[in-house]
Amino acid sequence: MGFLDELRGKSGKSGVLADERLAPTDDGDHERFSHYVDKNKITESAVTGKPVRALCGKKWIPNRDPEKFPICPTCKEIHARLK
């Protein structure tokens, strides 16, 4: 069973986290996105510092406010198909 298979049929189990880029960009934050991630994984990451994996496959340790960034188009598309 894959990551996406685990999320199917579990409404309310995803949240939004900000994408964390390691390399700085010259043009500001436009390359950053908020991603859909299992809520349980968000909590686990906050406690343990373990990376999370978004629906789009992005893996990172979140530490930014997701409200400041647009939603990842790939995550948004996958999330819509899971409903």
Image (tube, grey):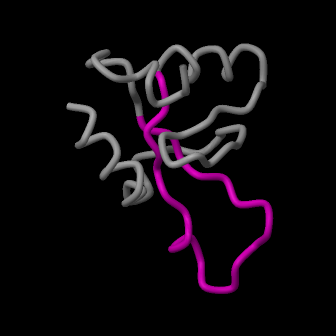
Instruction: Specify the principal SS of the magenta part.
Output: loop
Rendered location of residue 12, percent (x, y): 29, 18
Where, quadrant-wise, is the N terminus in this rendering? top right
Residue at 61 percent across and 36 percent down: it is: 53
Q: Residue furthest left?
A: 83
Q: What percent of the width, then of the height, locates residue 45?
A: 68, 22
As drawn, the residue found furthest toward the front would be 1
Q: Quadrant of residue 63?
A: top right
Asked if residue 56 lies left or right of residue 49, the reply is left
Q: Quadrant of residue 47?
A: top right
- 83 w.r.t. 28: above or below: above
Eyeballing the image, is 16 above or below 10?
A: below
Name the one closer to the observer, 15 or 56: 56
In magenta stretch: residue 12: no
Residue 48 location (% of width, % of height): 77, 16
Say which residue appears at 79% left-offset and 60% top-offset. Answer: 22
Question: In front: 3, or 63?
Answer: 3
Q: Is residue 25 magenta?
A: yes
Count the numbered circles shown: 0
Residue 3 is situated, as x and y percent measured from the top left of the image, at 54, 27
In the rendered image of this protein, does residue 39 appear above or below residue 36? above
Dividing the picture into quadrants, the one containing residue 80 is top left
In the image, what residue occupies the spot 51% across and 74% down?
30
Residue occupying the far bottom of the picture: 26
- Quadrant assignment for the C terminus: top left
Name above or below for residue 31 compared with residue 43: below
User: Would residue 42 be found to the left or right of residue 9 on screen?
Assistant: right
Which contiguous range is marked in magenta?
16-38
